[in-house]
Image (spheres, helix red, strand yellow):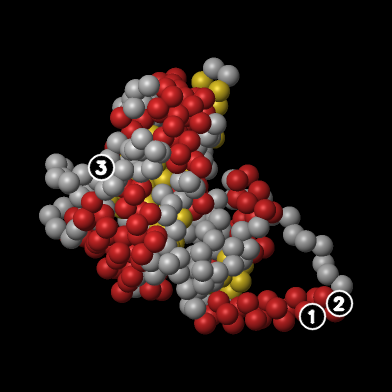
Amino acid sequence: MGTVTIAAIVSGCGSEPAPQAKPPATADAAAAKQSKAARAAAAAKVKANELGQVPVLMYHRIIEKPATTDDRSPAQFRADLDRLARDGYVPVTAAEFVTGKMDIPAGKHPVVITFDDSSPSQLTLDETGQPKPDTAVAILREAAAKHPGFRPVATFYVTRDMFGKSVKEEQAQVLIWLKDNGFDIGNHTRDHLNLRGMAKSGVQEQIGAIAKEIGALAGIKPVTIALPYGNQPSTKEWAARGKLGAASYDHKGVFLAGYTPASSPFSRSFDPLGIPRIKAMDKKGDCAQFCSTAWLDWLKSNPDMRYTSDGDVTTVAFPKFKNPFLSTTHKPYALPY
Ligand SMILES: [Zn+2]
């Protein structure tokens, strides 16, 4: 999406039509019409569907001996990324996803890779400032080197655990490294408490305090939040926007913990206050149907349900008959074919 679109999305309520360019002169109009037809034909050729679903994968620790079903081993994570690349996925961050800035090539599918709880297994830097081998970040970069076009980006949902660092300067080093290398930092609350049933002041304290710390350490203002245990506060809006003293937070997306692919941010069914994620896990036990392997299989065998890019961030391309699903906000950018 262009800057106009982004402004429209971040204003956020979905009812206000975005401003349109002034009508071009007649010759320009004919050229514009022709170029729109050409763009629609190009979108049709790659079966673009920017109203389709996007898998948002939820990871926790990447450790040699997984202790719970939330953990993945380095070997499993490598295999997960190989599969994503093989299936035509290109990673985008949670911030890019919720603001509709998924700038990936035509015919590719976006995937959002998220990590919760800021554990050292996700990123630990060595004495020269490089990610240690077998950390999530090191493995992501390996995958990008191995698969051309596979972007080494992900979103890290941070709590006070701060990648196992207790010294402020060391916490700042990790956060700034992530920021400088194109990674996205999200809010995961300070103490990882269950926000369900908590008073508004408590919710604001939990979210506001870590936002303030992330801002002070690295000058980062998280665009999204992931709720501990996926539990929403009694008023969903409290997770998105609030104040703590002079500080404030304003999230464009609130992520949950389960159990389906997410709606396209251009679709009417997109709810920025409750975006589902998928646990990264093989097809067994509780994960037979609702974790990543199962959903990636499903998206592969239901390509008409999956988000496919037309390679142009300024348009929202889709097969014409899906038009009723287009959100009002994004009508000016529609490229039906
Ligand atoms: Zn968590």
Identity, as a three-letter code, of the amino acid under mark 3: Arg
Residue 26 badge:
2
Give the Cα distance between marks 1 and 3. Answer: 55 Å
Residue to which mark 3 is pinned: 61
Q: Quadrant of residue 207?
A: top left
Residue to which mark 1 is pinned: 30
Identity, as a three-letter code, of the amino acid under mark 2: Thr
Give the Cα distance between marks 1 and 2. Answer: 6 Å
Looking at the image, residue 39 lies above or below residue 155: below
Q: Residue furthest top?
A: 245
Secondary structure category for the residue under label 1: helix
Give the Cα distance between marks 3 and 2. Answer: 59 Å
282 or 316, which lies in front? Answer: 282
- Ligand 1 within 8 angstroms of badge 2 C-beta: no
Identity, as a three-letter code, of the amino acid under mark 1: Ala
Looking at the image, residue 211 lies above or below residue 291: above
The location of residue 210, given as percent across then percent down, is: 43, 26
Residue density around tag 1, few if under 14, some if 14–19, many if 20 or more, within 10 Å: few
54 or 128, which lies in front? Answer: 128
Residue in view at x 27 percent, y 58 percent: 78
Residue in view at x 25 percent, y 61 percent: 79
Dot 1 and dot 3 residues touching (CB under 8 Å): no
Dot 1 and dot 2 residues touching (CB under 8 Å): yes
Nearer-N-terminus badge (3/2): 2
Residue in view at x 41 percent, y 73 percent: 304
Q: With 167 as the anchor, is 280 left or right in this view? A: left
